[in-house]
């Protein structure tokens, strides 16, 4: 079992682009969202390396196990467009919360809980540019401590996962 969170840029310019909808396989217009710069991708990779993440494997997956028991698989075959953390440990790992926050800052990303797109977490307001009208409400987490509080009280899916996780 895992709790999944997505990191993605929020750099909308008001235009749209045509992409294939992965579910219907038909063309669809999507708001254009600029990817990370090469320097931002390098910064995200540096954070993952500093945390001891292994990878990527052939599918772009990194694995990290932290000394306090924090554990996650990080899926990011195109880090410029975002990544997903599949959190596989108990949700109370301070080191994992620090890693989540450091990745959020390095990528100038926003964090969205899978299945709970109504709330979007950003490290600062500058990370949110031109968000479409249907974008979730943005909450600022200016520190790992802020992020810990938001994850433990803000995402309904996180609360459900936390209640099912077995704490040591």
Image (spheres, rainbow, N blue to C red):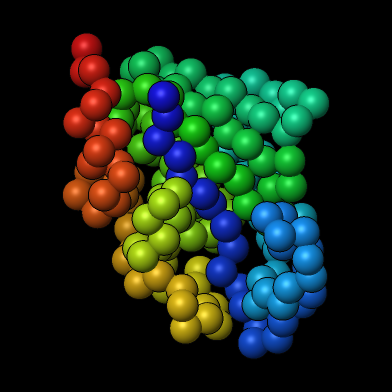
Q: Position of residue 68 (x, y in %)?
A: 34, 18
168 to 56, vertically: above or below: above
2 sits left or right of 166 in the view: right
Instruction: Identify which residue is drawn at 77% across, 77% down.
Output: 17
105 to 55, vertically: above or below: below
User: In front here: 13 or 113?
Assistant: 113
User: In front here: 25 or 67?
Assistant: 25
10 sits left or right of 17 in the view: left
24 to 61, vertically: above or below: below
Q: Residue furthest bottom?
A: 14
User: In front here: 58 or 109?
Assistant: 58
Q: Residue furthest top?
A: 168
Q: Position of residue 75 (x, y in %)?
A: 63, 36
Q: Position of residue 43 (x, y in %)?
A: 64, 47
Placement of the N terminus among the 4 image quadrants: top left
User: In front here: 153 or 104?
Assistant: 153
**Res. 148 visible in picture:** no
Instruction: Identify which residue is drawn at 24% across, 54% down.
Output: 154
**Res. 125 visible in picture:** yes
Placement of the C terminus among the 4 image quadrants: top left
Instruction: Identify which residue is drawn at 53% across, 52% down.
Output: 7
72 sits left or right of 50 in the view: left
Q: Position of residue 156 (x, y in %)?
A: 26, 49
Instruction: Identify which residue is drawn at 49% across, 27% down.
Output: 72
Query: What is the total number of numbered labels drawn onto the structure image?
Result: 0
């Amino acid at each position: 079992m895992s709790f999944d969170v997505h990191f993605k840029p929020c750099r909308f310019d008001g235009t749209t682009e045509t992409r294939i909808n992965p579910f219907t396989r038909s063309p669809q217009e999507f708001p254009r969202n600029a990817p990370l710069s090469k320097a931002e991708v390098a910064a995200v990779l540096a954070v993952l390396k500093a945390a001891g993440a292994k990878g990527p494997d052939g599918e772009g997956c990194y694995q990290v196990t932290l000394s306090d028991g924090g554990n996650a698989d990080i899926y990011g075959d195109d880090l410029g467009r975002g990544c997903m953390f599949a959190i596989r440990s108990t949700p109370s790992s301070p080191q994992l919360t620090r890693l989540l926050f450091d990745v959020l800052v390095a990528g100038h990303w926003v964090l969205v809980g899978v299945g709970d797109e109504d709330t979007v977490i950003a490290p600062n307001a500058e990370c949110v540019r031109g968000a479409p009208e249907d974008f979730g409400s943005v909450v600022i987490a200016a520190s790992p401590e802020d992020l810990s509080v938001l994850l433990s009280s803000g995402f309904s899916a996180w609360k459900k996962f936390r209640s099912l996780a077995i704490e040591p």
